[in-house]
Image (tube, rainbow, N blue to C red):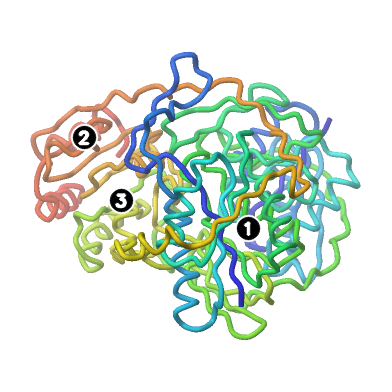
Amino acid sequence: MATLVLADHNQVSLQAATLNAVTAAQKIGGDVHVLVAGANAQGVAQAAARIAGVAKVLHADAPHLASLTAENVAATVVATVRAGGYSHVLAPATGFGKNILPRVAALLDVAQISDIVVVESADTFVRPIYAGSVLATVRSSDAIKVITVRATGFDAAAADGGSAAIESVPAAPDTGLSKVTGQELSKSERPELTSARIVISGGRGVGSAENFRLLEALAAKLNAALGASRAAVDAGFVPNDYQVGQTGKIVAPDLYIAVGISGAIQHLAGMKDSKVIVAINKDPEAPIFQIADYGLVGDLFQIVPELTAALG
Amino acid sequence: MKVLVAVKRVVDYNVKVRVKSDGSGVDTANVKMSMNPFDEIAIEEAVRLKEKGVATEIVAVSCGLTACQETLRTALALGADRAILVETDVELQPLAVAKLLQALVAKEQPKLVLLGKQAIDDDANQTGQMLSALLGWPQAAFASKLEPAGDRATVKREVDGGLETIEIGLPAVVTADLRLNEPRYATLPNIMKAKKKPMETTSPAALGVDVTPRLATLKVTEPPKRQGGGKVADVAELVAKLRNEAKVI
């Protein structure tokens, strides 16, 4: 029994959630191998080889893996799984993993198990459903288990300490099905949302894109990442990649500060596992206060600048 | 071109779901059911393509219980031309639904299949990607902008760090993300008209698809409740608590 973990990366560095997927793989038992599929991503393969607990890194290198399209990466994962006889295939439940793994599962004619938060045994896993209001324990009867791992459910494996061998594996031929022609990546001075120690999120109550600058100033003071509720994204205040919640990103930082967020269940789904939650809202009845450790009722336009100043 | 849109009947997003007392599942008896919100976005996109003269016919598909007819009627009221129900009382998992849709695609020959990116009940986020793999078609998951032009389409996709633009050939599978559009409401005249639109019923057996579940749900539970509700009076107290009590800043 061996588990293949598909590394999420951008050809230059490893996405942190890969480390949590490695921990989930270790809990399943058996050898843990990491597949780096990319173009000139040697640095990523070397980083993967240093992860504690990884027995081997498989590196598929081909020009047509430069833009990591679902079709080409999935084809290479399937070829690697078939050649290596893996019993489990894991990837972090990031945009990358969610795009690729269902495709891998369908090509292998097996189910995919999304967003696991607990490994109970090699075939039984716990996953949240209904925006995290319910936890389901599911058992797979498939020969190969294809799984995405919710990073907040598992500690990150140590990024250093391992010294796995790197082995070249062939990339599957170019499917030619899709071509990436452009990228608009949010430029931010702020840390990445899903791995930041502190997250500050704004909701509909923030009122406008301009007003989000108030949160930026506070985030700068705390070296925090900026997030948002779906309502704020819907209203066009911030791009969708800020979204924390059921259909956005799942975060569990040491400190989560919810500003002008009422606390819809689908938002709570994305942040309720944070260690400490602060809520700032003018409505004392807002559901967010029921889960907040420290609730402060009042006008965010006064409180946020005051808080920023107090941290000076 | 013909567009096929898959829609799922789910517990309405406003309902607070409850676990059955024996832990075997979620209580869906006497609970308000609606079309999965992401599927509404998928239907809306198809209707807009038809209004632009790009789509010629919209076929809405749902798989599951007889009651999915209601969801299909909603799709028809929103602008779909006809509907197909794949009726079964077997619990359908994403791979099974993808195979049912694959069989329907073989019959209907659409040039575009639109689905919501995820259903808000099982939160699986799999069916579109699986369908595209089974068909060997291009996949554009998490779309926030879709522009078909002839035999190709340009799609903006939501990715972890922002947006990615891809070019795909048609036929293709596209899954709708939140910002693709804002769905309209069905008007009363359109709801009335929808009652007269054709709805066909078929079954997994008729389509030759084995829908046996691959995953068994052993139990469902409610997660531990978070102890919250603490309040502070002002910013000074908040900062003091965060520094000295929670020790997070």
Q: Give the quarter of the figure containing the N terminus of chain A.
A: top right
Q: Quadrant of residue A124?
A: top right
Circle 1 Cα neighbour tier, 10 Å, few/some/many (<14 / 14–19 / ≥20): some
**C-beta proximity under 8 Å, tags 2 and 3:** no
* Front in this rendered view, residue A179 or B53: B53
Disc 1 secondary structure class: loop
Q: Locate residue B158, reporting x and y percent.
A: 50, 63
Q: Residue farthest to the top?
A: B22
Q: Between disc 1 and disc 2, whose residue precedes? A: 1
Task: Name the residue at 44% across, 79% down.
Answer: B51
**The residue marked by circle 2 belongs to what chain?**
A
Calculate the distance from the C-alpha at mark 2 to the C-alpha at mark 3: 15 Å
Residue A107 left/right relative to A214 = right
Return the mark for residue A201.
Answer: 3
Residue named by callout 2:
A289
**The residue marked by circle 1 belongs to what chain?**
A
Q: Amino acid at mark 2?
A: Phe
Q: Amino acid at mark 1?
A: Ser
Total number of numbered labels? Answer: 3
Disc 3 secondary structure class: strand
Residue named by callout 1:
A13
* Front in this rendered view, residue B225 or B180: B180
